[in-house]
Image (cartoon, helix red, strand yellow):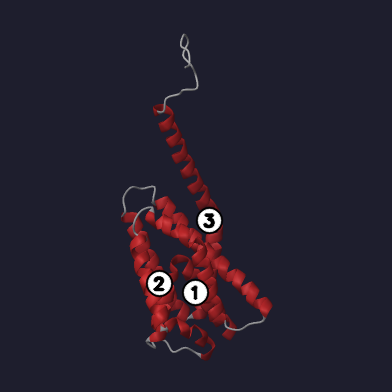
Amino acid sequence: MQILEQLGLGLGLASLAGLNLYLTVFLTGLLVRFDALHLAEKFQSIEVLGHDWVLIAAGVMYAIEFVADKVPWIDSLWDSVHTLIRPIGGTILAMQALGEMPAHVEVVAALLAGGAALTTHSAKAGTRLLANHSPEPASNIALSITEDIVVAAGTLIMVLKPIVALCLFTVVLITLWLVLPRMFRVIRRSFEIIRDKLRTLFGRNAPDYSVTPPGSSRA
């Protein structure tokens, strides 16, 4: 039972970090810092998230992301920058939650945690790219608020009911693995359409100097 609870906490931290690393750290740290949850001995390893400096750093970065995440195309640029940061951060958080383990188990756990964070990050980034094809910012704002709510709810479930979180996040990740290939095909097709439109636009407007008109001579 204990190992399942630790796995639930680790998988939850990794998965939520892929959506919003800084909010995940900030909320979990607040719960620890103000004794909103009483950490069992097996969870004492995440007590560091309640440190003042960790909370300040996570809070400042979340404030920046809160703004950037709601501006079309700026959000996708922010996601691009975090393509490595979120999986690495999610892996560190998961390993911190799992505590000391045999070396071979740590390697496997790190790979799984990194994969979970990368999966949720890819789903978020892909959804934002699709939303950015619409000119209005309302969809970006709605997506950002929804993601924050999901992270907040997921954090509470993960901390209060880690076994439930283990089952929930496992189902979510499997679903995303089935959906992501189709999403990326749609994104690729969208970029192909934009590319073709740009080629057509510049092809019509740009003069063609490759052919010399009959009766004229080149200098």
* Residue 116 vs residue 215, the one in the foreground: 215
Q: Position of residue 93 (x, y in %)?
A: 51, 76
Mark 1 and mark 2 residues within 8 Å of each other at the beta carbon: no
Q: Tell me which numbered mark, 1 or 2, is placed earlier along the sequence.
A: 1
Spatial CA span between label 2 and label 3: 24 Å
Q: Amino acid at mark 1?
A: Leu
Q: Are marks 2 and 3 in contact (CB under 8 Å)?
A: no
Residue that appears at 45% across and 66% down: 19
Please give the residue where the numbered disc 2 appears in the rendered image: 23
Marked residue nearer the N-terminal end (2 or 3): 2
Q: Which residue is mark 1?
A: 13
How many circles with numbers are drawn on the protein? 3
**x and y, in percent, of residue 154 in the image:** 44, 73
Does residue 140 sit above or below 21 in this rendering?
A: above
Label 2 crowd (10 A; few <14 / some 14-19 / many >=20):
many
Compared with residue 201, is residue 64 higher up or lower down, i.e. above or below? below
Circles 3, 1 touching at the beta carbon (< 8 Å): no
Nearest the viewer among 121 and 77 is: 77
Which residue is depicted at the point 46% across and 22% down?
Answer: 209
Residue receiving disc 3: 180
> Which of the marked residues, 3 or 1, is nearer the chain's N terminus?
1
Q: Residue furthest top?
A: 215
- Which mark is in front, 3 or 1? 1
- The CA span between labels 3 and 1 is 21 Å
> Is residue 182 positioned above or below 117 on the image?
above
